[in-house]
Image (cartoon, rainbow, N blue to C red):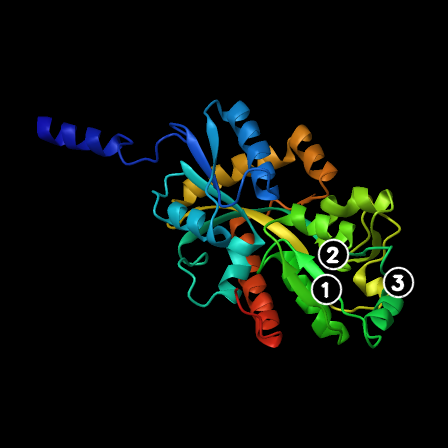
Amino acid sequence: MKRRSLLLASLATPALAQPAWPSRPVTVVVPFAAGSSSDIIARATAQQMSATLGRPFVVENRPGATGELGARGVIRAAPDGHTLMHGPISVWAINVALRPNLGYDPVRELTRITQTVRTPNILVVNPRLVPATDLPSLIEWMKRPGNAVSYPSSGVGSSDHLTGEMFKLATGTEMTHIPYTGGGPAMTSIIAGDTQVSFQNLGAVSGHILEGRLRAILSTAESRSPILPAIPTAAEAGLRDFVVYSWQGYGAPANMDAALLREVHAAITAALRAPAVAQRMTDLGFDIVASSPDEFAAFQVAEIERWRRVVRAGNIRAE
């Protein structure tokens, strides 16, 4: 009888239950340098989660190989919710499409938690060099004999790079891609007149547009931005099927427990919707998405296929 009682007691205890999360400091890996948009969003949400949950959330920058180094480190961690990753579209989708020998698989080897934010790209020109004020006049100018057009990007495989390649395919224009090591140098390039045309994130160019250093031609968003309401969408400008967003997402090592995933997802999305964080995202030109894990996973797969088609059509290779 005593042995039976002990057995029943052991079965009744929650020895195998998931421990409370977080039970220790949480590391949020950002696979890019400090100051990047991924880093800014990670720090804002980490600070909010620390305040709400009472545990440290420490952002750790692990840049290298267009995000591959950081992603591989996260994949090797335990799926216990104490190692998370916040990264951009390149880590989640474009790397897969662009690099056939990629050293990680973000579909099989990472738990997709939530797409955090998105922002459209704005097609801008240097007004001192480019007389065009709308899409038809820009295409006409680009196709004039003798015009050598170049566009900067924040790096090979970035959203601004591949959006430029999409534009070439959609309009039959030619531009030379000039990759830089980040959005800052790319912006410096077009403002200085070293390049003439570029697709850049809304938040990065809005101030330059308002102050006249750059001229906006169109936005790749579904609808006009309240920050720059005068800028037409690509569809309004005459370019159909050209909705493009640069987006970010939170993930973790694969095989995270379903109950734990729900808990981590709830904490991240609550942090995104906290008034101070939400306002900061708006100020930076981001729309909050806060999708479910299933929605994020389906969206990621669709994005991989979309960019794979662009890479193949444009015969684009990682440099």
The label on residue 34 is none
For marks 3 and 2, give the one nearer the viewer.
2
Q: Do residues under tags 3 and 1 come within 8 Å of each other at their CB atoms? A: no
Circle 2: element type? loop
Residue under pointer 2: 194
The answer to whether 228 appears left or right of 165 in the picture is right
Give the Cα separation between the discs numbered 3 and 1: 18 Å
Which one is in front, 158 or 113?
158
Which of the 4 image quadrants contains residue 216? bottom right
Residue under pointer 1: 150
Give the Cα separation between the discs numbered 3 and 2: 21 Å
- Relative to 89, say whether 309 is above or below: below
Looking at the picture, how far across and down is residue 193, in whole percent? 78, 54
Residue 244 appearing in the image: no
Q: Residue at x 53, y 47 (%)?
A: 87
Circle 3: element type? loop
Circle 1: element type? strand
Q: Earlier in the sequence, mark 3 or mark 2?
A: 3
Q: Amino acid at mark 1?
A: Ser
Q: Earlier in the sequence, mark 1 or mark 2?
A: 1
Q: Residues within 10 Å of mark 2 (few under 14, many from 20)?
A: some
Residue under pointer 3: 134
Looking at the picture, how far across and down is residue 110, in whole percent? 43, 52
Q: Residues within 10 Å of mark 3 (few under 14, many from 20)?
A: some
The answer to whether 46 appears left or right of 195 in the picture is left
For marks 1 and 2, give the one nearer the viewer.
2
Q: Do residues under tags 1 and 2 come within 8 Å of each other at their CB atoms? A: yes
Looking at the picture, how far across and down is residue 2, in whole percent? 10, 26
Give the Cα separation between the discs numbered 1 and 2: 8 Å
Q: Residues within 10 Å of mark 1 (few under 14, many from 20)?
A: some
